[in-house]
Structures are given as C-alpha cells and as structure tokens.
Image (cartoon, helix red, strand yellow):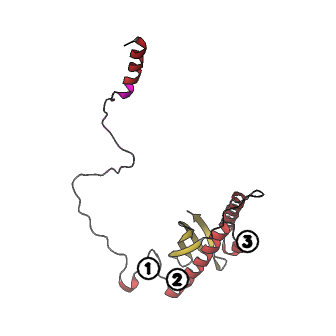
Amino acid sequence: MTSMTATRVDNVTHLVRPRRALAPTSFQGTLALDLGPEQQLEPPTPLATGAAALRGADLVAVEPRTRHDLQRWVHTFSQAAVEAARGLRPVSQLLRWTTPGVHHELTYRSGVMARATVHGPGQAGRPQVRPQVQSVHLSFLGEETVEFSARVRHGERSRCLAGRLEVLGGRWQATALEFG
C-alpha cells in the first residue's frame, strides 16, 4: 500500500467507524409520561343535566329559533368573508358587519390576493376556485357574544375560518376573524 492509499484509507475509516453510543436523554416528538403509581381520579360531573343542559360549548342558554337564525346568518357572513379575502367580492359589502380592525384585515388580504394573481400579457391564469362554506359551528359565550368556526372547501382542500361576533350598535359585528 502506498502512502497515498494509506492516507485515503485513514481519511475514510473515521467516517465509517461507528461513533461511541450516547444514552439518549429525550427525543423530539415524544411525550414525557409519569409512570409512577396510578392515581384514582373522580369522574367529571356535568355542569347541568336535563332541560338545563346547554348545547355544545354554549355558556348561556339560547332559544332554538335564535340559534337557527344566527347560524344561517353566520353561514352567509362566512361565505362573504372568504370570498372577500380571496378578492372575489368587494370588501366594502362587509363594512356594516365588521369592526374597523377586521375590515382593514380583509382589505389587506384582498389586496395581497389581487397582487398574487396578476398575470402578464399572454399568460393564462389558473381558473379561480370559489370557496364554499361547508359547515358552521356556534358557541354562545353570552347573550351578545358568539364565537364561530366554519369549514371552508377550496376545491379539493378544506380550510377553516374562526371568528367572534358581538352585538355593537344594535347589530352583530365581527370583532375578530382568523383564517386557517
């Protein structure tokens, strides 16, 4: 073996030779469990039962008619909000139903989408897929406060919209919206 070959072998063997094993202290993505003596926990008791039980995550009792009417309105509002955020509907149509902060956020999102879908001359754009609200879920936090979530379908994908509605100036207004 020549000195050149010996040098190459020495340079390679440290790459192939196993390193000394270290005891793992933790792994990313694992859950630390306490495997100590088992504790007996009392089963949870419901806050209310029978006629006094509240539906879903409601914190106050709501008449079925009020729930139904607001659920229909939230479905329509959510559809309009996702269309406005995608630039498919003028944001000004939601001015009456949003606070200034939410309206500003929708205007910003709509502008970003408009700039992202600009095509140069002779370039064909992708066909627009209209978002469709599939389901809406409400949680009444008070007589004048509701939080909602909506599942929105964009073609083959599903996304979500969450928001908070409050009665301001005698009408329901969105005080917070989160797109996911």
Q: Which residue is mark 1?
A: 55
- Residue extending farthest front: 1
Q: Position of residue 77 (x, y in %)?
A: 62, 75
Query: Residue 74 at what x, y percent from top left?
Result: 58, 77
Q: Amino acid at mark 3?
A: Ser
Asked if residue 20 lies in the magenta stretch, the reply is yes
| Mark 1–mark 2 distance (CA, rounded to whole Å) | 10 Å
Tell me the quarter of the image containing the C terminus.
bottom right
Count the labels in the image. 3
Label located before the other in sequence (1 or 2): 1
Classify 74 as above or below 2.
below
- Residue at (43%, 76%) from the top-left corner? 56
Tell me the crowding category of disc 2: few under 14, some 14 to 19, or many 20 or more residues within 10 angstroms, Cα based.
Answer: some
Q: The disc labelled 2 sits on which kind of residue? A: Arg
Q: Give the residue type at disc 1.
A: Arg
Q: Give the SS element for disc 1.
A: loop
The answer to whether marks 1 and 2 mark residues whose Cβ atoms lie closer than 8 Å is yes
Q: Residue furthest top?
A: 3
Q: Which residue is mark 2?
A: 67
Q: Which residue is mark 3?
A: 92
